[in-house]
Structure formats: structure tokens, C-alpha cells
């Protein structure tokens, strides 16, 4: 039997040639935050005994088929979180396949809302909206500390998400 809860974690990384995030955008993604969010949410749910389907993708398609960033993998391994993922780009069918689509930041949330089809059934929200409304910062250009912060946020957001959406049945 398929799980009732099907979650998609979405992100992209914004690169700027002049480091001004308002110009020179190149969108890539699904190698840092979202695969970590996917792996952490799956692990947290498993430890709680919750059956869940989790996937992740990017709003851009520049890393399609690639494995997660080495620092994402290293951070997950440090915390004994299994991670196996191949980057992909979101498509409109995801809005009916998944019950929840979680964005890493406000920019992703706006992008997702703008592409959401009229027949969408998924709830589209900021991942952090289940706890403190904070975005998950892009760790790509930083060191391992940034990836550790992403892990900590994903763990806290996963707990808060499951606390809100999973109904305990006696």
C-alpha cells in the first residue's frame, strides 16, 4: 500500500556573476539543500514509524542526473542519514503526485506558486513555515559549517512538519 503522505522538497541555487542577486541569474539546483531535506525528512519519519514517500527536485535543470554535492553527502554521513539521489527538475505532474511541496526559501516558493497548475492538489509551502518561517540558506559557496546549518534546519523543520501533518491514530 502506498503511503498517504507524499512530500517533495524543492530548491534551486542562485548563482550571480557579479554577486548581486538581482542580476545575472543562472538557476541550477537539487544538489545541496533539497536532497539533504529529502534524506533528513525520510530518516526522521522512519524513526517515528511513519510511512512516507519523499523526493526532491530543483526549479532549474542544470544538474539533472547528478548526485548531491559532496558536502551534502558528507554532512548526511556524519549524522548517519542515508542519502541517495539523482538531481531532477520539477514538472507540473508533481503538483498532483505529491500531497505537500516544500520550498527551501521565498524565491522558490514564488516560483512554485507561479507554475502551480489549476488542477494542483499538493499544498505548497515554505519548509520553515512549520516552525519559524525561516528560509534554508544556500550553503553552496561556503564551507561545511553552512551544510551543518542546513542539516540542523532540515532536522528541526522535519520534526515540525511531521508534528503538524501526521495525525496520531490510536
Image: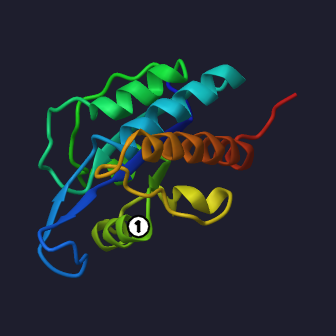
15 left or right of 68? left
The percent position of residue 86, horizontal first and vertical second, equals 23, 30
Q: Is residue 26 visible?
A: yes
Q: Secondary structure at mark 1?
A: helix
Measuring 21% from the left and 72% from the top, which residue is drawn there?
19
The percent position of residue 102, horizontal first and vertical second, equals 47, 53
The percent position of residue 76, horizontal first and vertical second, equals 46, 26
The residue indicated by pointer 1 is: 109
In depth, the one of 152 and 91 nearer the eye is 152
In depth, the one of 96 and 23 nearer the eye is 23
The percent position of residue 39, horizontal first and vertical second, equals 46, 30
Q: Is residue 130 above or below residue 166?
A: below
Q: How many marks?
A: 1
In the rendered image, which quarter contains the C terminus?
top right
132 left or right of 115? right
Q: Is residue 144 above or below residue 60?
A: above
Q: Is residue 83 above or below residue 151?
A: above
Measuring 31% from the left and 69% from the top, which residue is drawn there?
111
Q: Quadrant of residue 85?
A: top left
Measuring 44% from the left and 42% from the top, which residue is drawn there?
147
Which color mode does the image show? Answer: rainbow
* Residue extending farthest bottom: 22
Measuring 34% from the left and 50% from the top, which residue is drawn there?
142
In depth, the one of 99 and 146 nearer the eye is 146
Q: Is residue 49 visible?
A: no
Number of residues whose C-alpha sits closer than 10 Å to that of mark 1, classed few (under 14), some (14–19) or many (20 or more): some
Amino acid at each position: 500500500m502506498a503511503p498517504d503522505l507524499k512530500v517533495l522538497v524543492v530548491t534551486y541555487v542562485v548563482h550571480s556573476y557579479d554577486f548581486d542577486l538581482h542580476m545575472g541569474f543562472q538557476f541550477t539546483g537539487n544538489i545541496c539543500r533539497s536532497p539533504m531535506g529529502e534524506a533528513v525528512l525520510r530518516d526522521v519519519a522512519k524513526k517515528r514509524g511513519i510511512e512516507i514517500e519523499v523526493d526532491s527536485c530543483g526549479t532549474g535543470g542544470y544538474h539533472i542526473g547528478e548526485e548531491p554535492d559532496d558536502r551534502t553527502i558528507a554532512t548526511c554521513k556524519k549524522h548517519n542519514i542515508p542519502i541517495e539521489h539523482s538531481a531532477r527538475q520539477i514538472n507540473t505532474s508533481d503538483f498532483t503526485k505529491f500531497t505537500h511541496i516544500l520550498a527551501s526559501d521565498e524565491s522558490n516558493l514564488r516560483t512554485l506558486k507561479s507554475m502551480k497548475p489549476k488542477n494542483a492538489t499538493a499544498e505548497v509551502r515554505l519548509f520553515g513555515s512549520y516552525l519559524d518561517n525561516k528560509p534554508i540558506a544556500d550553503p553552496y559557496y561556503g564551507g561545511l559549517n553552512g551544510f551543518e546549518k542546513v542539516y540542523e534546519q532540515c532536522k528541526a523543520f522535519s520534526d515540525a512538519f511531521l508534528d503538524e501533518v501526521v495525525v496520531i491514530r490510536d
